Amino acid sequence: MKKIALILVFLIHLFTLGAFFSASFSPKDYPNLSLYAITIPFWILIELILGIFFIRYRPWAWLMPWLVLLIGHHHFQSIVAYGFLKERELPNHLSFSVLSYNVRVFNAYKHLQDEKPGSTHKMIDWIINNPAEIKCFQEFHHLEKSDSLNTMYHLAKKQGYDYKIMPWNNLSKKEGYFGLVILSKFPIVESGGFPLEEHHESRGLYADIKIGNDTVRIINVHLQSIFLDDAEVVKVEASSRQMGRKFKNLAHKIRLANISRAGQVKFLEDFISQSQYPIILTGDFNDFPWSYTYRQMKKTFYNAFEQAGQGFGISYNGKIPFLRIDNQFYSPQISILDFKTWNKIPYSDHYPIEGRYYLAK
């Protein structure tokens, strides 16, 4: 019996290490490994349980789970932040805040209004009252001839922000504007869009912003969504066959989205490498902190939540719990003072995130 238990524990360690390393491989080349990487938090939890349980046993049995967790410590750091323990120098010059928010078309559609009554005006009012000097939005919606949804007027022109949208879109077109937006209290000296996929309209938006005597490139992205129905995901099916079919369909959607995001990350990396300015990269990444997408970004940038956030930083306000899919990354030339997830602002299916930065000298 003891021998079987030892074999089982050994296999758990092996599966945990396999999950840790699976996030290093591109989903475009190894799509099934990207599904394996999703299970990383489960294996971390199992190793923690084993590490605590084995305290009463021989030292080698107690040390093994902690050794495995040490090998994958970067994943643990991505899931839980303890920024309040880190000392940060106070800036001796200009600091600035960057707000990022997936506003879900300001809940303009009837079914979204039914879900969150009155949320359109509440969301717009909250954004107006937020003093961040730079604001980035995903799923932004604007209707020129609408009083309530003339959002560019209410949020930008009326508040004294310069603004940039996708260059080929026209704010006054009849069907309105939908997409990415960057607002800035500082001068925008250059801006534009860049491709995230080949032969596709999916693009990112950037703005080079003059802050004091320096220039910072702000990049706003919205990477490929899985297009999940929250209610359907959490629903318990009547039979095991139906549950199996549902999970198979779910795995297929996640696999396709992972492949698409891996391609988008490559285009994003190419664009980032061309910048002569330090970068703050923000947006809705639609991916987990232990994913390939996240690991690729951390090769170049620091993550604001990891450096200055607290707790789990859950940014998705839907029925699927514990998802942090919105992020701010920043270049080493930039320093962070504070990071906040506004998890008391319930109007969208995402929570706003905000980092305060200054340029390190």
Image (cartoon, helix red, strand yellow):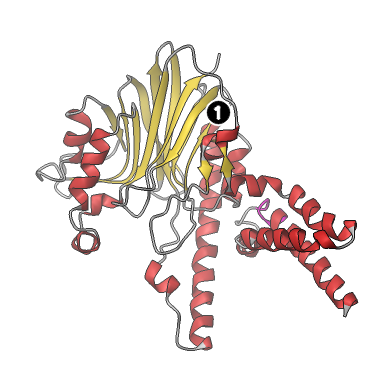
Q: Residue at x 9, y 43 (%)?
A: 147
User: Predominant secondary structure in magenta?
Assistant: loop
- Residue 207 in the image: above or below residue 54: above
Range of magenta residues: 21-25
Q: Residue at x 52, y 87 (%)?
A: 241
- Residue 248 in the image: above or below residue 153: below
Q: Position of residue 345 (x, y in %)?
A: 32, 47
Give the residue pinned by disc 1.
Answer: 331
- Confirm whether residue 176 shows in the render: no
Q: Is residue 125 left or right of residue 354?
A: left
Crowd band around label 1 with a 10 angstrom C-alpha radius: few (<14), some (14–19), many (20+):
some
Q: Residue at x 65, y 49 (%)?
A: 75
Q: Residue at x 49, y 47 (%)?
A: 313
Quadrant the N terminus occupies: bottom right
Q: Secondary structure at mark 1?
A: loop
137 magenta-colored: no
Quadrant the C terminus occupies: top right
Q: Is residue 110 left or right of residue 299?
A: left
23 magenta-colored: yes
